[in-house]
Image: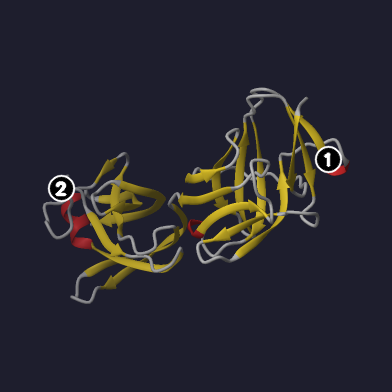
Amino acid sequence: MRKVFFIILLFSIQLINSQGNTVTVGNAISNYIKIVDVYDTSSSSVVKLEFNPTEGLNGTLHSPTGESPYVVTDKKGNRYALKSQSGWLGSGTNGFGSRDLKINEKFTISLFFNKLKSITDIYSLTEVDCEGDRCWNFYDIKVTAKTEAIFDKTWIDYDVNDTDGSFGIKIHTKFSIYYMKDSPFYLSLRIMKGSDFVKTANVDFNNTSGQIELKKHLTPGYVKTLYKDETLFLPYRLLREELSEGVNNLKIDVDLFNLDGTLLEHLGFKEFTYTKR
């Protein structure tokens, strides 16, 4: 006789791609179900489960208003209710009801909960008042969130003076960064002509490869940190010393780097022209 298991969920046709965060679980009841991702959407925190039964089973899908609904609990003991799900295709209306879980038939479902303040605060995923080996409970969940940077724009003020009197361009950059709270990095702007980086011998404005590089160290104060207007100044004299006469079509390579010099995120490019007379 096949075993019967019950899980409390609500069907939804919403589909969200995995974000690729790193998840570890200290204690799980079922050995054929695992958490493969935890991530945020704009309105929910999502737990993605992967099923891979080693024997024939039958599962039943119930709504969150039934008995023993799934909840997420954070490290402070706060509970977050299940709102919806996707991926469970039961025999009932809108995907509710029973379905057979075939041997080695791997599939995933996504559970959408009221949003946590931070997905890294998650501690457990459990069915309320359900104990024993028939419950699909997970404890001591640890999430290492994947850093994400979202580029908005870069814009330029031409023909301005810096605080030291230098004449040149002021470069503005707007972007957001996620899951880097209290972790320092730096904003890097390098100048390109065609496929080559423009170089300078000026040690105040170059990197170890001799490329013109403007840098600004930043430390996010929040899980999501918005940098509305980070500015760096490029003196015209650097371009005048290195570029040919006439109109030069250039672009700014906008990047974020870890302090050890490894690339954190490429944000984009900003094209501009410089005319040397």
Residue at image position (55%, 43%) is: 28
Seen from the viewer's position, the closer of residues 46 and 242 is: 46
Q: CA distance from mark 1 to mark 2?
A: 63 Å
Where residue 33 sits, quadrant-wise, is top right
Residue at image position (45%, 49%) is: 146
Residue at image position (21%, 52%) is: 212
* Residue 196 x/y as whole percent: 27, 40
Residue at image position (76%, 47%) is: 12
Seen from the viewer's position, the closer of residues 39 and 26 is: 26
Whether tag 1 and tag 2 are in contact, CB under 8 A, the answer is no
- Which residue is disc 1 drawn over? 97
- Which residue is disc 2 drawn over? 208
Q: Amino acid at mark 1?
A: Gly
Q: Which corner quadrant holds the N terminus? A: top right
Q: Tell me how the rendering is colored.
A: secondary structure
Can residue 171 be seen at all in this image of the molecule? no
Image mark for residue 155: none
